[in-house]
Image (spheres, helix red, strand yellow):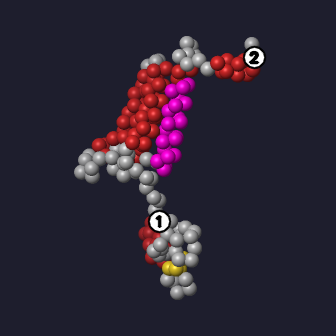
Amino acid sequence: MSAEGRADSAAETAEEIEVRDPVSAPDADGVPRRTTRRFPLFTRDTARPEGGGRAAPRDAPAPARQWPVLLVLGLVGVGLLITALDVFRVGTLVIGSALLAGALLRWLLPSVGMLAVRSRFTDIVTYGALGLVIVLLALMAQPDPLLKVPFLKDALHFTVDS
């Protein structure tokens, strides 16, 4: 089937399906009636995450409208560069801090652009938990860990043969 044929059949299908209310179903005459609370069988679009609007005015250039995600990605890039330059602990601390900054931005700002991926709560928990784990692992990294966990040595004693 050619591209024009697929486009025509898709247009015909789009004309046949008319959804006026997300919880309505057509009756025998084709008039939508609210008979169920279920969502429609066919969805046309996905909802933008809460806070997923522009972080700057519409007339601002594209990078300025997405400054929160660019800030987080830039800090992660700097952390990766520092890690590549053989300063492992500092680089991973910068990466973890960038994710914690993303969680803080998601919590404080009403609109964060593409930094909003899921619901606000899920984004904050995800960015915060991953950032915290990366920071803690960077602080516990050998040699000369800055954070010593007492039970970690005992746990490793049972898993590593001497």
* Labels 2 and 1 touching (C-beta < 8 A): no
Query: Does residue 134 show up magenta in the picture?
Result: yes
Mark 1 crowd level (few <14, some 14–19, many ≥20, 10 Å Cα):
few
The relative height of residue 72 versus residue 145 in the rendered view (above or below) is below
Q: CA distance from mark 2 to mark 1?
A: 58 Å
Q: Residue furthest bottom?
A: 29
Residue 42 is at least partly visible in this image: yes
Circle 2 residue: 161
Using the rendered view, name the quadrant where residue 137 is placed. Answer: top right
The relative height of residue 37 versus residue 26 in the rendered view (above or below) is above
Residue ID at (33%, 46%): 55
Q: Position of residue 38 (x, y in %)?
A: 57, 69
Q: Position of residue 102 (x, y in %)?
A: 43, 38
- In the drawing, what numbered circle is on residue 44? 1
Q: Position of residue 32 (x, y in %)?
A: 50, 79
Element marked by disc 2:
loop
Q: Which residues are magenta?
A: 118-137
- In the drawing, what numbered circle is on residue 58? none
Q: Is residue 131 left or right of residue 60?
A: right
Quadrant of the drawing holding the C terminus: top right
Kind of residue sitting beneath label 1: Arg
Q: Earlier in the sequence, mark 2 or mark 1?
A: 1
Q: Position of residue 63 (x, y in %)?
A: 31, 43
Kind of residue sitting beneath label 2: Asp
Query: Does residue 76 show up magenta in the picture?
Result: no
